[in-house]
């Protein structure tokens, strides 16, 4: 039987929020079978639990934000996508995440530090079948027309692969790959995707900060690009780091559905909002998916059954 997974022990991280600039502490703890991933705001007078699911997403401007039942007036947790991406990449099903502020720390701007933290705590197999969402027919969402067109799609596939294309029309981005495909069957999340950092353009910084965003951003936790070039002295970690970060985000956004997908995801200029709309459209069509388990691990798709090796 392909089993559910949680952590063997708890682990902690301290950092700042990318948008809030606030110091925040995370404590990642094991959780029982069928718990899913649950954030807990422990800084409040009465701690508030926020289970992760598509309906909990209440804001997608610049990041994925959740609150209880998606209530915009309730306590929130912002910028969950990099940590969710790491959980997906390691196949973690059940986890409690205690957080002392409104935003998950940005750390180095990628999911690599979260992968390291989770693997350092150890992965524990649990006595219950791991449940997947198997896509049975294509589901798509499209917005805009012409140069403003963007779309995202899920199609049936025995495994999990993602392809993404960006179009920024910027000299620094044009010099890199703008389309990438990642297949869990043949690639390694930790090696191929996890180190891709978030990125921002200097021309957008003042606008963001006037809206109270990007207050914790720096070249320590983001790729910074001016009108012509990458400003970070160490350059890019991957030749196609910009589009790989969009894949990293998509993996995190899609894991909000609560189970790993058996699907082929493809997208053009998608983002947090479109990814969440795609999940909601999927769940509105009961004939488009089914819950799958694997009594025989040998029949599970390659790349989704193996435990990721420790660092």
Image (cartoon, rainbow, N blue to C red):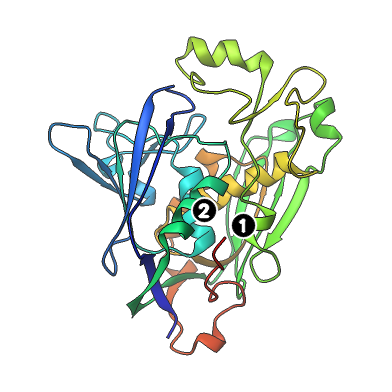
Residue in the picture at 75% in, 37% down: 236
Residue 283 lies, in percent from the top left, at: 41, 59
Disc 1 target residue: 190
What whole-number distance in Å separates the C-alpha atoms at marks 2 and 1? 7 Å
Residue 256 lies, in percent from the top left, at: 43, 52
Q: Could you say which is closer to the camera, residue 114 or residue 54?
A: 114
Residue 42 lies, in percent from the top left, at: 22, 38
Instruction: Please say whether residue 265 is visible from this viewpoint.
Output: no
Disc 2 target residue: 115
The reply to whether dot 2 and dot 1 touch (C-beta < 8 Å) is: yes
Residue in the picture at 35% in, 65% down: 8
Query: For the residue labelled by badge 1, is the local secondary structure a helix, a strand or a loop?
Result: helix
Q: Could you say which is closer to the camera, residue 309 or residue 278?
A: 309
Instruction: Please say whether residue 97 is visible from this viewpoint.
Output: yes
Whichever of callouts 2 and 1 sits on the residue coming sooner in the sequence is 2
Instruction: Check the picture and name the quadrant holding the C terminus.
Output: bottom right
Other residues around mark 1 within 10 Å, as few (<14) / some (14–19) / many (≥20): some
- Displayed quadrant of residue 127: bottom left
Residue in the picture at 43% in, 80% down: 293
Residue in the picture at 31% in, 31% down: 101
- Displayed quadrant of residue 154: bottom right
Query: For the residue labelled by badge 2, is the local secondary structure a helix, a strand or a loop?
Result: helix
Q: Is residue 279 left or right of residue 153?
A: left
């Amino acid at each position: 039987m392909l089993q559910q997974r949680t952590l063997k022990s708890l682990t902690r991280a301290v950092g700042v929020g990318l948008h809030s600039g606030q110091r925040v502490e995370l404590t990642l703890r094991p959780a029982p079978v069928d718990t899913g991933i649950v954030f807990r705001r422990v800084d409040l007078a009465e701690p508030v639990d926020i289970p992760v699911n598509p309906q909990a997403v209440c804001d997608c401007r610049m990041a994925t934000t959740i609150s209880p039942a998606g209530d915009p007036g309730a306590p929130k947790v912002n910028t969950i996508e990099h940590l969710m991406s790491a959980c997906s990449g390691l196949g973690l099903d059940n986890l409690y995440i205690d957080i002392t502020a409104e935003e998950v720390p940005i750390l180095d701007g990628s999911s690599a530090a979260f992968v390291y933290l989770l693997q350092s705590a150890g992965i524990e197999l649990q006595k219950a079948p791991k449940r997947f969402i198997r896509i049975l027919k294509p589901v798509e969402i499209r917005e805009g027309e012409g140069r403003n067109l963007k779309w995202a799609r899920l199609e049936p596939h025995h495994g999990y692969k993602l392809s993404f294309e960006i179009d920024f029309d910027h000299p620094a981005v044009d010099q890199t790959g703008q389309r990438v495909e990642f297949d869990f069957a043949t690639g390694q999340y930790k090696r191929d995707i996890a180190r891709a950092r978030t990125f921002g353009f200097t021309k957008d910084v003042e606008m963001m900060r006037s809206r109270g965003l990007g207050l914790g951003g720096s070249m320590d936790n983001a790729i910074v690009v001016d009108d012509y070039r990458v400003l970070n002295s160490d350059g890019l970690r991957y030749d196609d780091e910009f589009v790989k970060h969009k894949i990293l985000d998509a993996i995190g956004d899609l894991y909000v559905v609560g189970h790993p997908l058996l699907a082929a995801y493809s997208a053009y200029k998608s983002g947090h909002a479109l990814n969440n709309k795609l999940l909601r459209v999927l769940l509105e069509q009961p004939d488009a998916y089914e819950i799958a388990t694997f009594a025989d691990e040998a029949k599970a798709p390659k790349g989704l059954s193996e435990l990721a090796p420790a660092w």
